[in-house]
Amino acid sequence: MIWFDAHGDFNTPETTSSGFLDGMGLAVAAGLCWKRLALSIPNFSPIAGTNILHVGGRDFDLEERVLFEQAGATVIDADAIEQTSVRDVLIPVMAKFRFNVEEAHLHIDLDVLNPKEAPANEYVTEEGGLSVKQMIEAIGLIKENLKITSATIAAFDPKYDAQGKSLQAGLKLIRKILSSE
C-alpha cells in the first residue's frame, strides 16, 4: 500500500483527537481498528505495516507517528522530498519494498499536493506539499519497481478549486498511472 496524503490517516478511535473517521482509513487497512467492520468486507486481510509506505505527509497527529513506527511502516514526509528529491528519497525505499511485494495499491489524496498549485479541499491547513511534477515523478518511480494493481484518487472538493487546478492535477496523475511509460 502506497499512501500519498497530507495527513497520516493512521489514527484509531483511541488516538484521534478529532474523532474524524476519515483519518483512520489506513489504520483500518492495517487492521489496527474497526476490526469487525473491516471483516465485513469480503476477503479482507490486514496489510502488514512493513508493506505500507506513506508519502508526502505534513500534518500528523503525535500518536499517529507512534503507530506508524510501531507498525513498521515507512513514512516519507513532504519535507524530506523537498530537502532532497523524489528520486533520492524513493529509490532506496523502492529497493526495500521490492523484496516484500511485487504489486501495490496506490492511494492519492489530492491534499498531498501544494495548495498553491492545486487547492484540493478544506482540510489542508499547512503550506507546502508536493508539486504535480513531483507526484508524476514518484508515480513513475513506483511503476519502475512495482506493478500498480489498483488506485484511488480522494479528497477533491470542487468548491475549493474554482480554477480547476486540482481537477487537472488529478487527471494528470491518473494518466500517469494508466500510461505504459
Image: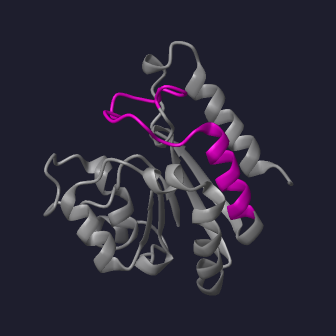
The residue drawn where x is 45% and y is 73% is 44
**Outermost residue, bottom side:** 99
Determine if the magenta segment contains residue 132: yes
What residue do we see at 45% from left, 80% from top? 50
Residue 75: quadrant of the picture: bottom left
Q: Which residues are magenta?
A: 115-143
- x and y percent of residue 120 in the render? 47, 30
User: Residue 27: where, in percent of width, then height?
Assistant: 33, 65
Q: Where residue 54 sits: x, y (%)?
A: 46, 61
- In the picture shown, does residue 110 fall above or below 63? above
Is 99 left or right of 45, judged from the image as shown?
A: right
Whole-percent x and y of residue 163?
Answer: 56, 13
The part of the image, by quadrant, that contains residue 140 is bottom right
The quadrant in which the C terminus is found is bottom right
Question: In the drawing, does residue 152 fall left or right of residue 67?
Answer: right
Residue 175 is at least partly visible in this image: yes
**Residue lying furthest right:** 180
Identify which residue, 33 or 165, lies in the foreground.
Answer: 165
Is-magenta flag for residue 121? yes
Would you place residue 177 above or below residue 29 in this image?
above
